[in-house]
Structures are given as C-alpha cells and as structure tokens.
C-alpha cells in the first residue's frame, strides 16, 4: 500500500493539512487503492511485504514507523524532508527476501555492506539475521542511521553493526582498501533514481565487489535513467532477476562479477 510518509511528503507544502488530517487522508485513500490492488498479480506477496512493515506511531513530535522482521519489532525514525531518511518500498522487498530466504542466503557470520543505507532498515534486518554489517551513507545521514541501527540491534544481534561514511566514488581505496576489505554481500535498495552520481555509484559497486561477492539489489523503476544504469551495470556484472513486482515497479536482482554467477534452480520465497 501507499505509505503515510509518502502522503506527508506529498502534502508538505500545503500547510492547512494537520498531521492528524494527513493520517486520515492516508487511511481513506489506501482503502480505495486496496480494492484495485487485490486484482493485481502477486497481490498476496506484495500484501505480505507491506503487512510486515507498518504499524502507526502515536502522534508525537518525532516521526517513526514500525516494522516486523526477523522475529523482532523494529522502530525506524524518519525525516520526511530528506530522501535518505525515509523507508522506501524497495527496502521492504529486500528485507522480506532476506527473512524468507534465510536458508539459501544464510547471513550468519557473513560480512555485509549496505550502500545508501538511509534509515538502516535493511542493515538492521541483516544484522538480526546474524551478519557482520557495515551500514553506509552520506555524512549528513549518519546520525539518524546510527540511532536506528544501534537502537534496533543492541542486545539482539550476534555481531555489533558498524555505521560508516561512504560517499560514492570518493576515497574508496582510503576508506575501504581492496587488500583488507572483503564483503560476502553488498546490499542496496533504491539507490538508483534521479541524481547526478550514477557514475560514482557504479564505481563504488566495482570497488567493493570481489570475485565471490554477491550483490542483492532492489530497484524501483521510475525513469529511463534506471534502464540505462542497468545496461551499464551489466558491462561489469552478471545480473539475475530474483523477482519482479509490477504493481510496485520494483525488481529484485542478484549480481556477481562477470563469469562468476552460477545459476542454480531453486524456489525462492519472493
């Protein structure tokens, strides 16, 4: 379903809507959307993903949303005035995949890095599933990211996650030296959109990815730029579609360096 923070963003410039009115509007519009949504393919899967994600907060001065993944309640503090500080549906798709495919993609004791972690939901779920997680994003987002990650993993995760600055394409060798940094998984959700740093994003994928690294990438298609980036991405990596969600315009990919992908027939829970 459409999320409350989407409507908050949509009506942020219309001062006559109070927060309570926005919540009521959210409920009314979502009820109408659900009637059509149930007729779409894969409704049951998408509905399950979205069911896991949302229970409303008591109206306070601080916005947060609640989620249920990996057997835990997760509370995420958001900021509706910043793209990197809200939870986008692609993150929910990736979290649901990690949770429901934890046997095939066993994260216990695996080194995982999330790029463009934003609010940290994917990193939190990976950590709760046993991974050694490095959550990264721009310096201005690290405060909220660290708050969310530590609040939701303390005394719950096998390994304490790390929050670290990563500005795509900048000081990669200095901050993540190839000789000593090895990640079993790179995770990314909704990192491709209308921004001028797609070259730097591709450079970052290239720098962090070793021959045996698996990239799990959930992507929402909006404009032609997304298609163009996928084409450029495939010059360096083999790409496998794990699942499509047409009603959300989201595709979940698995990628590895060219020539390293082994496609094994299996049933995934997404």
Image (tube, rainbow, N blue to C red):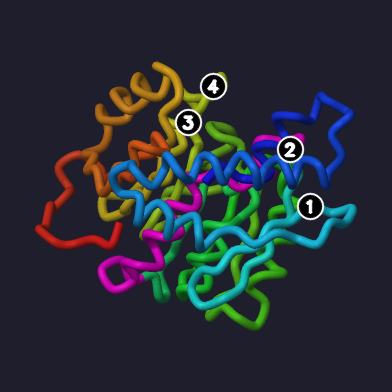
Residue position marked by numbered label 3 in the rendering: 192
Q: Is residue 202 above or below residue 156?
A: above
Q: Looking at the image, which residue sits at the far top? A: 224
Q: Is residue 13 above or below residue 161?
A: above
Label for residue 63?
1
* Of pointers 2 and 1, the one earlier in the residue sequence: 2
Bin the neighbour count of mark 2 within 10 Å (Cα to Cα): few under 14, some 14-19, many 20 and up: many
Q: Are marks 2 and 1 in contact (CB under 8 Å)?
A: yes
Residue position marked by numbered label 2 in the rendering: 8
Q: Secondary structure at mark 2?
A: helix
Q: Nearer the viewer, residue 14 or 219?
A: 14
Mark 2 or mark 1, which is nearer to you? 2
* Of pointers 4 and 2, the one earlier in the residue sequence: 2
* Of pointers 3 and 2, the one earlier in the residue sequence: 2
Q: Image point 46% across, 59% down: which residue?
A: 95
> Is 5 placed left or right of 234 in the picture?
right
Distance from Cα at disc 4 to Cα at disc 2: 21 Å
Mark 4 or mark 2, which is nearer to you? 2
Q: Residue 161: x percent and y percent?
A: 59, 67
Distance from Cα at disc 3 to Cα at disc 2: 22 Å
Q: Are marks 3 and 2 in contact (CB under 8 Å)?
A: no
Q: Based on the displayed image, in which of its 4 quarters is residue 234 positioned? A: top left
Distance from Cα at disc 3 to Cα at disc 1: 25 Å
Which stretch appears magenta?
A: 81-106
């Amino acid at each position: 379903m459409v999320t409350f923070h989407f409507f908050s963003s949509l009506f942020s410039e219309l001062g006559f809507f109070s927060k309570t009115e926005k919540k009521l509007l959210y409920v009314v519009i979502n009820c109408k959307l659900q009637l059509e949504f149930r007729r779409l393919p894969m409704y049951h899967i998408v509905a399950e993903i979205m069911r896991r994600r949302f229970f409303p907060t008591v109206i306070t001065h601080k916005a947060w949303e609640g989620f249920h993944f990996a057997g835990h309640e997760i509370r995420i503090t958001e900021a509706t005035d910043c793209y990197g500080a809200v939870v986008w549906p692609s993150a929910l798709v990736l979290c649901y995949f990690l949770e429901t495919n934890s046997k095939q993609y066993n994260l216990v004791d695996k080194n995982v890095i999330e790029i463009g972690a934003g609010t940290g939901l994917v990193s939190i779920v990976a950590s709760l599933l046993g991974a050694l997680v490095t959550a990264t994003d721009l310096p201005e987002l690290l405060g909220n990211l660290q708050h969310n990650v530590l609040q939701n993993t303390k005394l719950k995760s096998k390994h304490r996650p790390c929050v670290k600055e990563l500005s795509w394409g900048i000081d990669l060798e200095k901050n993540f030296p190839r000789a000593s940094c090895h990640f079993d998984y790179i995770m990314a959700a909704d990192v491709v959109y209308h921004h001028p740093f797609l070259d730097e994003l591709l450079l970052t994928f290239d720098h962090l990815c070793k021959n045996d690294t698996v990239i799990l990438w959930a992507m929402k298609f909006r404009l032609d730029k997304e298609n163009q980036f996928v084409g450029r991405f495939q010059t360096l990596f083999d790409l496998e579609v794990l699942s499509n969600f047409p009603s959300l315009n989201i595709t979940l990919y698995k990628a590895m360096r060219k020539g390293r992908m082994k496609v094994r027939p299996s049933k995934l829970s997404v």
